[in-house]
Image (cartoon, coloured by chain):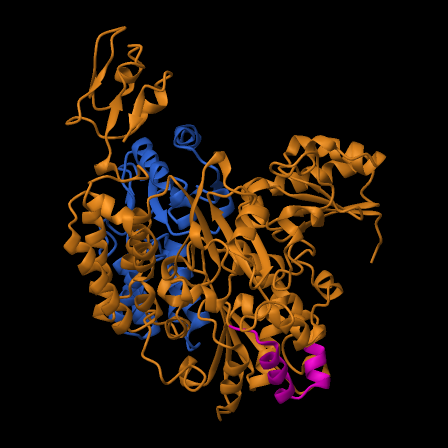
Chain colours: A orange, B blue
């Protein structure tokens, strides 16, 4: 292995790839060649750094200088100034929102300061397509320890003692799951990984697989050793081509190094791993549906018990964990259960990765200790709400979760607290909403999703989600009554109690939590026929303020419905019967004379 | 129901059929091979018309109902061809709260067809997808394999014109 004086790390995650990072990487290589630096400096394509909003991200080591939003044309300057002469390119340094001056190093930023990277360790540090880099970053050390120094019982004991709980959403204690699967008596068992990250707005599993796929492979092998399995499957969404590709490369390299296959590390433990691609069905995130899909059937859930630990894939005992859960395992083995249990709250140990999205400055991926408050996430790590708008609510847990209003922003986020305020941590999607978002519309959005994704097997979900969506539709077009709200609540309770699987049982959550915290918005739609956020089109009216209108005719010329009339230099009027509420006139008006109410 | 029946005549070639047979040969007898075979078949033909589903069922010796059951269950399988240029507008949560609905409307207006449809000349098709995982760049759309992020409705026309 040759040594170089400096490494330039460029993010190759999906977000930065979309922001043209492959071209930036190619340009670095070209410039290194032109400046004859190719022998002393190396450019490395890494996984996700987390700060997707400011991609492509470039970090220069050994200094750790943090450049953001780098364009192809900026590369030459970084090479000629920073790499060649050691002078920082001030104008390209990451600038903290609201802060004065620049931040030189990654770890000094508000965005990273409060983070603790366990599941995401390696992401944005190593080249995920090089197993040597994974090994240099402790990869496969935990597996070696387990296989050569620890008994199966000891491994399960460590996982149990760490307090790790399932990161896919339900939060079931991982150690207990392993114990059940280990106790099942059958010569054939399976270990599976749920990488069917269907919750819209969550992308931590994808980032782990793109940034450090070896950590998941290693953890699945540790699990297989602990429960006595020899075959594993990773079920991953076909919508994640980069993750699939890197996982394939990682599996091939692990096989080549003898870390996967027969007699691993010279022991009698053998394990083989296959990838199965999902085909776009949200319900396949449910464990029994996922196993049905791996078997090649329609991904429909079945009643439990029997639990997969007893009767799972192909009728055999099966252990199924989520990507992020697995990604914690090697760290726990290497650092000890106590070190993990020391992080977090009493019943929720360790860290959780959240995908910050929506109306927030620093959109991206953050890993924080359990028990961090929503305020710290939104205001400090997330950099607040852009455009001077006010925080209204944060939606967590996707279509199975709920909203956290401003009054509860100081709640420490852990499994118990979230449940008590009517939401869930779920897979970790965290969408921030400002005053311009209508909560009834958001509930309708999620119900539209669950109606589409209901597999149709049980009637509470198949019919119930559709009926709930119908009522929300009725409310948002201004035809709702107070009886509808009561009916909606009744339906929610029935569906929660009677649906077959997690999808149906949690589908009413977005409605229940918005009704709990934003009932006044529902009532405004029903009683006043008004949408306070100005989102529900049928309840809107555009009006021209005669005192501000200069009669420039700009609005009447762009109106696609010819709804605006008036003479030049005289105030115009909108014919409400013709108006299609497209809002084009508002954009055109230079005098702020058109208002939405 | 837009995706339950094939609406265009089938024009499969001998070459495609041979490729499919090869795929079936390599997977036959493997546990849970139905979906991987169907995914490969869709790559070969671009979609899964009735004729292809019959071929898969007969050659894998499984009931046609099972193949159809799978193809109509999963969103990724399509019974009708997609356009040469596929536009997918993300309607995931992060994109939705940032106005993805307006983006989709503008795309439909510019291209001249509705979501899940294909233009008369077969050039464009539009889909709305649920999260492509680029939430940091919301709202997002994908045209074939190119991702366009941080979109505004007024950007849409110029982007699509590049493909026209």
Look at 33% across and 48% down and name the residue there.
A439
State the image quarter where residue A324 is shown.
bottom right
Q: Quadrant of the C terminus of chain A?
A: top left
A224 up-or-down from A133: above or below: below
> Residue A388, percent across and down?
49, 34
> Residue A50, percent across and down?
59, 50
A325 up-or-down from A372: above or below: below
Task: Give B99 or A248, whichever is nearer the viewer.
Answer: B99
Magenta stretch, main secondary structure, is: helix
- Residue farthest bottom in this picture: A185
State the image quarter where residue B17 is shown.
bottom left
> Residue B94, percent across and down?
43, 47
Residue A45: in sight, yes or no? yes
* In this rendering, position of residue A128 left or right of residue A292: right
- Residue farthest top in this picture: A569
Look at 21% across and 37% down and name the residue there.
A538
Residue A168: in sight, yes or no? no
> Residue A199, percent across and down?
42, 58
Q: Quadrant of the N terminus of chain A?
A: bottom right
- Residue farthest front in this picture: A407
Which span is picked out in magenta?
Answer: A143-165
Look at 68% across and 55% down and name the residue there.
A127
B138 up-or-down from A450: above or below: above
Q: How many marks?
A: 0
Q: Is residue A148 magenta?
A: yes
Task: Give A34 or A101, whichever is nearer the viewer.
Answer: A101
Task: Give A14 or A257, whichever is nearer the viewer.
Answer: A14
Look at 17% across and 26% down and name the residue there.
A576
Q: Is residue B79 magenta?
A: no
């Amino acid at each position: 292995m040759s040594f170089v004086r400096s490494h330039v790390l460029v993010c190759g995650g999906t977000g930065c790839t979309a922001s043209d990072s492959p071209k930036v990487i190619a340009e670095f290589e070209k410039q290194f060649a032109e400046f004859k630096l190719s022998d002393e400096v190396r450019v490395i394509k890494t996984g996700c750094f987390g700060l997707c909003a400011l991609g492509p991200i470039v970090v220069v080591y050994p200094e750790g200088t943090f450049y953001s939003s780098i364009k192809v044309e900026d590369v030459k300057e970084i090479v000629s100034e920073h790499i060649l002469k050691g002078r920082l390119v001030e104008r390209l340094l990451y600038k903290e929102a609201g802060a004065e001056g620049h931040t030189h190093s990654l770890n000094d930023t508000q965005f990273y300061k409060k983070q603790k990277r366990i599941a995401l360790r390696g992401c944005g540090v190593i080249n995920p397509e090089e197993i040597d880099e994974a090994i240099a970053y402790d990869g496969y050390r935990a597996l070696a320890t387990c296989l050569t120094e620890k008994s199966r019982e000891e491994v399960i004991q460590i996982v149990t003692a760490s307090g790790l709980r399932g990161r896919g959403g339900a939060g079931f204690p991982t150690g207990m799951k392993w114990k059940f699967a280990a106790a099942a008596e059958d010569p054939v068992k399976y270990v599976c990984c749920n990488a069917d990250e269907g919750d819209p707005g969550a992308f931590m599993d994808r980032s782990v697989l793109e940034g450090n796929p070896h950590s998941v492979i290693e953890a699945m092998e540790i699990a297989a050793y602990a429960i006595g399995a020899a075959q594993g499957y990773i079920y991953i969404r076909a919508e994640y081509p980069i993750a699939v590709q890197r996982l394939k490369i990682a599996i091939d390299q692990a096989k080549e190094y003898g870390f996967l296959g027969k007699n691993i590390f010279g022991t009698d433990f053998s394990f083989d791993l296959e990838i199965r691609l999902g085909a776009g069905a949200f319900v396949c995130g449910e464990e029994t549906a996922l196993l049905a899909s791996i078997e090649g059937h329609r991904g429909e859930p079945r009643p439990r018990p029997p639990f997969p630990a007893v009767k799972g894939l192909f009728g055999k005992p099966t252990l199924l964990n989520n990507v992020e859960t697995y990604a914690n395992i090697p760290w726990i083995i290497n650092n000890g259960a106590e070190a993990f249990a020391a992080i977090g709250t009493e019943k929720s140990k360790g860290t959780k990765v959240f995908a910050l999205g929506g109306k927030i400055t620093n959109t991206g991926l953050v890993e924080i200790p359990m028990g961090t408050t929503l305020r710290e996430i939104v205001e400090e790590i997330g950099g607040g709400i852009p455009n001077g708008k006010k925080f209204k609510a944060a939606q967590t847990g996707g279509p199975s979760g709920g909203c956290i209003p401003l009054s509860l922003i100081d709640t420490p986020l852990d499994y118990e607290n979230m449940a008590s305020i009517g939401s869930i941590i779920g897979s970790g999607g965290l969408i921030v909403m400002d005053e311009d978002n209508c909560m009834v519309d958001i509930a309708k959005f999620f119900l539209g999703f669950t109606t589409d994704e209901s597999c149709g097997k049980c009637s509470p979900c198949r019919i119930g989600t559709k009926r709930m969506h119908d009522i929300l539709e009725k409310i948002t077009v201004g035809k709702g009554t107070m009886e509808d709200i009561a009916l909606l609540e009744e339906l929610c309770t029935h569906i929660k109690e009677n649906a077959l699987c997690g999808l149906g049982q949690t589908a009413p959550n977005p409605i229940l939590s918005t009704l709990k915290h934003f009932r006044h918005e529902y009532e405004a739609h029903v009683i006043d026929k008004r949408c306070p956020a100005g989102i529900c089109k049928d309840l809107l009216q555009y009006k021209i303020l005669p005192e501000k209108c200069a009669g420039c005719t700009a609005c009447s010329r762009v109106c696609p419905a010819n709804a605006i009339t008036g003479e030049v230099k005289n105030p115009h009027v909108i014919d409400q019967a013709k108006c299609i509420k497209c809002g084009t006139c508002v954009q055109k008006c230079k005098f702020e004379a058109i208002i939405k109410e | 129901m837009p995706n339950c029946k094939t609406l265009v005549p089938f024009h499969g070639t001998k070459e495609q059929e041979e490729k499919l047979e090869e795929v079936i040969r390599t997977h036959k007898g493997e546990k849970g091979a139905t979906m991987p075979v169907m995914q490969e078949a869709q790559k070969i033909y671009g979609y899964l018309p009735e004729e292809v589903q019959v071929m898969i069922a007969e050659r894998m010796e499984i009931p046609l109902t099972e193949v159809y059951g799978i193809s109509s269950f999963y969103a990724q399988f399509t019974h009708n061809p997609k356009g040469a240029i596929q536009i997918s507008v993300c309607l995931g949560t992060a994109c939705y709260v940032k106005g993805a609905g307006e983006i989709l409307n503008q795309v439909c207006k510019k291209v001249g067809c509705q979501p899940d449809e294909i233009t008369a000349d077969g050039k464009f098709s539009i889909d709305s997808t649920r999260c492509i995982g680029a939430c940091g760049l919301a709202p997002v759309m994908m045209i074939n394999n190119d991702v366009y992020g941080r979109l505004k409705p007024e950007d849409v026309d110029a982007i699509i014109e590049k493909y026209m």
